[in-house]
Amino acid sequence: MNKLRHELWLVRHGETEWSAAKRHTGRTDIPLTPAGERQAAHLSRSLAGRQFASVLCSPLRRARETCRLAGYGDTASMTDDLLEWDYGIYEGKTTQEMKVEQPEWSIWTADVINGESIEQVGRRAQRVIQRTLEVDGNVILFAHAHILRILTACWLDLQPDAGQLFVLRTASVSILGFEHGRRVITGWNLQHDERI
């Protein structure tokens, strides 16, 4: 396959209680809400049985369930490189809660105590990108907002903190690819009511 026609499809998991409440959900392994399950099931219709040369998935329950309900559970390979950012002491907290104590606080610039630095997450994202580029065909990833945002920044040869520019909705599909030999975003935040 011509690598310049290669596409990388990114799927953020469906809604969870914590995503609905805007809590930083790193390694806490929580399930989808009923609404999140419905979102994931809608993905199976919008993806319409598309075939991928490789299906990679975070081992966390919310990503695995989204992958299964979207119709790719039987072909998925789990990889720890797609785990969500380890938020350390910020796990379960909202940005608004942190801003009460530190008005300028942002996960994108904070020192993450007992967790991962953004550079560490960026290295995991680069490993995923390299793995996908070795596949002869399109690849789909089922994972989490921040790891996928950082992966997108890395795909575009930006610094990992540029991921803050790419907001991802739950159960959305985004597509990375090539145009004129350059890595680009070809679709972003597509959802089940849009043509994918």
Image (cartoon, rainbow, N blue to C red):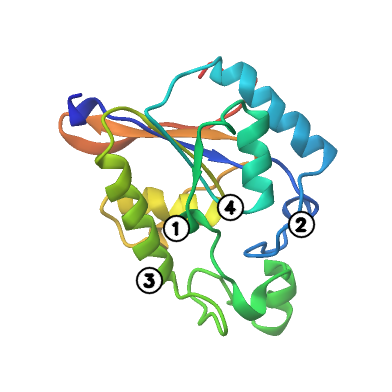
x and y percentages locating residue 158 in the rendered image? 29, 56
Mark closer to the chain start, 2 or 1: 2
Q: Is residue 136 left or right of residue 24?
A: left
User: Mark 2 = which residue?
Assistant: 18
> Which is more N-terminal, label 3 or label 1?
1
Label 4, secondary structure: give it. Answer: loop
Which of the two discs, 1 and 3, sits closer to the camera?
Answer: 1
Q: CA distance from mark 2 to mark 1?
A: 22 Å
Cα separation between marks 3 and 4 = 21 Å
Distance, label 1 to label 3, CA atoms, is: 13 Å
Residue 193 sits in quarter: top right
Position of residue 109 relative to residue 160, above or below, is: below
Q: Earlier in the sequence, mark 4 or mark 2?
A: 2
- Disc 3 marks which residue? 119
Residue 111 x/y as whole percent = 50, 82
Which residue was labeled with disc 4? 59
Disc 1 residue type? Asp
* Residue at the disc numbered 1: 81
Contact between marks 1 and 3 (CB within 8 A): the answer is no
Badge 2 amino acid: Trp
The percent coordinates of residue 146 (x first, y second) are 53, 56
Q: Earlier in the sequence, mark 1 or mark 4?
A: 4
How busy is the neighbourhood of tag 2: few (under 14 within 10 Å), some, or many (20 plus)? some
Is residue 171 among what the camera can see? no
Q: Secondary structure at mark 2?
A: helix
Q: Closer to the observer: label 2 or label 1? A: 1
Sort mark 4 into few (<14), some (14-19) or many (20+) by Cα contacts within 10 Å. Answer: many
